[in-house]
Amino acid sequence: MVLAWRRMATAQILTIGDELLSGDTVNSNLAFLGERCRRLGISVIRALSVRDRIDEIVAALVEVGDWADLCLVSGGLGPTSDDLTAEAVARACGVSLQRNAEAEAALVAMFARFGRPMPEINRKQADLPAGADMLVNPIGTAPGFAVHLPGSAGSGRRCYVACMPGVPREMKRMMTEQIEPRLARELDLQATARRVYRAIGRGESAIAVDIEPIVAAARGRSPGLANLYLHYRAAAPQVLIIAEGTPGPGGARATAEELAGFDAEFMRALQPALYGLGEADLPARVVAALRAAGKTVATAESCTGGRVGALLTEVAGASACFYGGVIAYDNSVKQGLLGVSEGDLVAHGAVSEVVARAMAVGARRALGTDFAVATTGIAGPDGGSKEKPVGTVDIAVADADGCSYKRLSLHGERNLIQHVSALWALKLLWDRLVELGLARVEQLD
């Protein structure tokens, strides 16, 4: 079945602030807003960052009014002289700024909760473009607002502009609680069907060789599949393969059911690298599988310095399955806490299969868990040799039935080697859970 044609709403994301262009602040707001638009079925055509200069902000707004249905703006709503978003939006709309009584009352109440009087400078934050719809900010001082920005004369277009604070936690809450319900009323939204396949252990070019023929053969099945958009997201050591039912020129788009029809063939083509389908990442899946099975895990880390444990504890609910870890950076810790023998360290070196296995077994014994993950390696930039160059990493996973092991030969900067090693350690644990029937490759969001 092909869904009835509906034009996808188009959007621009406009982030404001000198700090975004100087490198002082990472623009995480852009990534969040882009992801929310994708989920809503809004096509982000352009993302633009501008300085705190009123003429530049006005120019970005006037231009977008002629082609976009939506412009999401973050930043520039504070009380200081470089916060110019409200004034810029008013100019672009051809209206004046007006003191919003509701916004002013909210500001006074917010400072009362802080236990101090409101500085006079903060009243500026209640000055909104005339006719703007105020957006409540329950966790910060800067209210947001939304307006309809007319296009140029004769264009017949009207762009919905929603302005949010630049503080990420305030912006995220305003977007999900205030703006998204309004967008459902403002725009004719239809979420794009999407299927995500997650793999570790194969490069994107090798993956493409195997799955592109599958997709090519499927394009003739329906007009929607003919318009299927397939793309790859590579971030070592992981590759995401994303199939999206984006509409073609005639509006036909693949349905969720049609995309799910790729599962069997993709799973065969991507094994053993494939670990899951959907939005949930590897740490979330490991924690979910351990919790469902009533099993526990510990870590013993040398070169990764606690990163494996950090990945696990980023997942809500990890306390039900993760007991703790030993950062055994020095050989004396490997010996004293994990029981690695001095003879093995002398004979094989700290970076070796024998030591990795002994660390995993020792961590499992010391912490009393069902599983234990160990890493030992050379993250660089120094310390390598001809036999064990920088990027040599040994990982092991111990359980009641034995110990699995893998050697990695990695390349890149120190932080990258540590990050890749930590994810590979969890992949080795995941593979063992699958082998034992405690986990399976499935859709999980």
Image: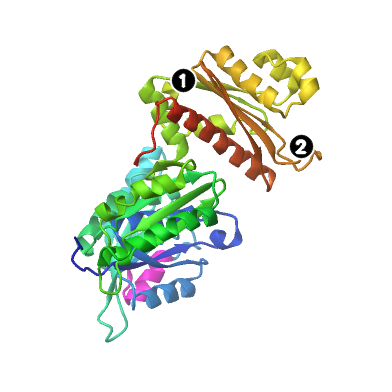
Q: Which of the 4 image quadrants contains residue 186?
A: bottom left
Secondary structure mostly seen in the magenta stretch: helix
Quadrant of the rendering where the N terminus is positioned: bottom left
Of the numbered discs 1 and 2, the one sitting upstream in the chain is: 1
**Residue wearing tag 1:** 296
Q: Are marks 1 and 2 in contact (CB under 8 Å)?
A: no
Q: Nearer the viewer, residue 309 or 165?
A: 309
Q: Nearer the viewer, residue 393 or 13?
A: 393
The disc placed on residue 388 is 2
Secondary structure beneath disc 2? loop
How far from the left and from the top, in percent, is residue 183?
Answer: 25, 59
Secondary structure beneath disc 1? loop
Q: Residues within 10 Å of mark 2 (few under 14, many from 20)?
A: some
- Look at label 2 and name its amino acid: Lys
Q: Nearer the viewer, residue 305 or 198?
A: 198
Quadrant of the rendering where the C terminus is positioned: top left
Please report the bounds of the magenta region as a residue range. 85-97
How far from the left and from the top, in percent, is residue 170?
Answer: 39, 48
Residue plotted at (37% across, 49% down) = 265
* Left or right of 328 on screen, residue 298: left
Q: Which of the 4 image quadrants contains residue 61?
A: bottom left
Separation of disc 1 and disc 2 at Cα? 32 Å
Q: Tell whether position 93 is magenta.
A: yes
The disc placed on residue 160 is none
* Left or right of 35 on screen, residue 300: right
Question: Which is more foreground, mark 1 or mark 2?
Answer: 2
Q: Which of the 4 image quadrants contains residue 6?
A: bottom left
Residue plotted at (24% across, 60% down) = 190
Outermost residue, bottom direction? 154
